[in-house]
Amino acid sequence: MPNSLPRLRMDLDFMPSPDPERPGLLIRDPFQYSDVMLIVPPPMVPLLEMFDGQTTTNDLREMLMRMSGDPNVDALEKSFLDTLSLSGFLQDEVFESKREARHKAFAEATVRVASHAGTAYPATKEEAQSVFSEYMRGDEPYAEGNLVAIAAPHVSPFGGVDCYRAAYRALRPEHRERTFVILGTSHYGEPNRFGLTRKNFITPFGEAVTDTALVDELATAAPGAIEMEDYCHATEHSIEFQVAFLQHTLDGPGRTSSLLAADGRPMMTGGLLGPDGRPVTASSRGHQVKILPILCGAYAHSIYEGGLPENDEHVARFLGALGEMAARRSRDLVFILGVDMAHMGVRYGDQITAVTGGEEMQEVEQRDQARIAALNAGDAPAFWELVQQNQDDLKWCGASPLYTFAKAVPQARGVLRRYGQWNIDEASVVSFAGMTFTA
């Protein structure tokens, strides 16, 4: 009796090959259980539909024989099956072994290491400092009142650099000792849940310290909403990029000279004394950015079924706990929102070829701006009503962190500093913005 083919994993990334000399379908694993990137040639792409857990090996052989015109397809069949399996792309024992090993490694790790250094940005401190210094080159920081949050993209830094710079220019020396509550999009996490970790974050700039007391406070207050030591943290870029920009902006070259008190003397840090008996200043003692990293799962039920996100009791409990924390610690917390906005074009399943500046993307910008205006006005219900239209056909992957912030800090009012769109490939566009929020 023929065996059923295993299922193809549907949590993989599928997109057109970016290499014109190697056309086909690019498959990669966003969870990094596998580091393989596979390009399936166009004639073989239809074969992937057969890996549904019901189609048999005989069905696959018959299809291969029709395609090749050769009755002897044993080697071709074995090669195709082995390639998918060994890549970790099938729901089989090979994948389960890879998955178990990765989860175990993350659970046992003492820190969260940078998973995108060397691809999205440089892997060495010297190179990263040079590149980020160029990214941040521009005007002086904003001189404004009580900063409570910034919103920056989480697209690759080189694609959204103007908006990253527009957001991070709001940070000033007095913010160095704050704890930064980073609300990032959980691209692959469980809907209506929040991923936490107690691990410190490592980037080429050094180690950012996670405030474990605040992590535990949220985990205790809203246990049903929390995924503790969420594996998604291991691979998610929406927080990692913010940590790197925070470290460079607050601790990068040339920043220590500006860390002066109002009387022009170096800022003191806790009255510590150095080996020479002199007080230790912020510039002479190593500084580590303090963070509270939170991955926000999509509010999918609300978008597709209606109602508000907080109609889910677990979401409501988490929003309440975060809001209480924000109110109690308003003097020493700053929120960082790692958010992209619209995702349009072929890569994202649309029938249009999206081009920055094109007619379709001009309409997208108008709709983006309406959502941004609602956020800036502190009108969370109006913002979410716009998101729910057409079940969020703009595909904002920053909607849940933005709504979470708007509910937790309802007194915040925003300013759009920069809006941008970027062709992530020749047929697809991502939009994003740099924003600041004050109380």
Image (spheres, grey):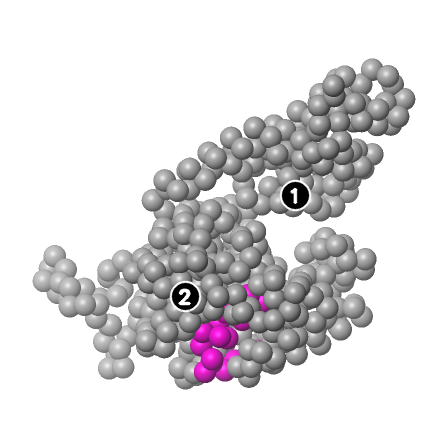
Pointer 2: residues within 10 angstroms few (<14), some, or many (20+)? many
Judging depth in this view, the residue of 175 and 106 nearest the camera is 106
SS at mark 2 in the image = strand
Q: Which mark is residue 10?
A: 1
Under mark 2, the amino acid is: Val
- Position of residue 433 measured from the top left corner of the image (x, y, whole percent): 59, 70
Q: Is residue 27 left or right of residue 337?
A: right
Marks 2 and 1 sit apart, C-alpha to C-alpha, by 32 Å
Q: Amino acid at mark 1?
A: Met
Going by the image, does 298 lie left or right of 79? left
Relative vertical location of residue 382 with respect to residue 387 in this rendering, above or below: below
Image quarter (top left, top right, bottom left or bottom right) of the C terminus: bottom left
| 310 vs 36: above or below | below
Label ID, residue 181 = 2
The spot of residue 307 in percent (x, y) is: 61, 71
Residue found at x 42% / y 37%: 104
Q: Give residue 417's quadrant in the image.
A: bottom right
What's the mark number on residue 106? none
Residue 295 picture location, percent across and down:
48, 58
Residue plotted at (87% across, 27% down): 67
- Quick check: is 414 in the magenta stretch? yes
Residue located at (39% from left, 42% from top):
107
Q: Would you say residue 334 is visible in this rendering?
A: no
Q: Which residues are magenta?
A: 397-416
Secondary structure under tag 1 reads loop
Q: Is residue 363 magenta?
A: no
Q: Is residue 173 above or below residue 106?
A: below
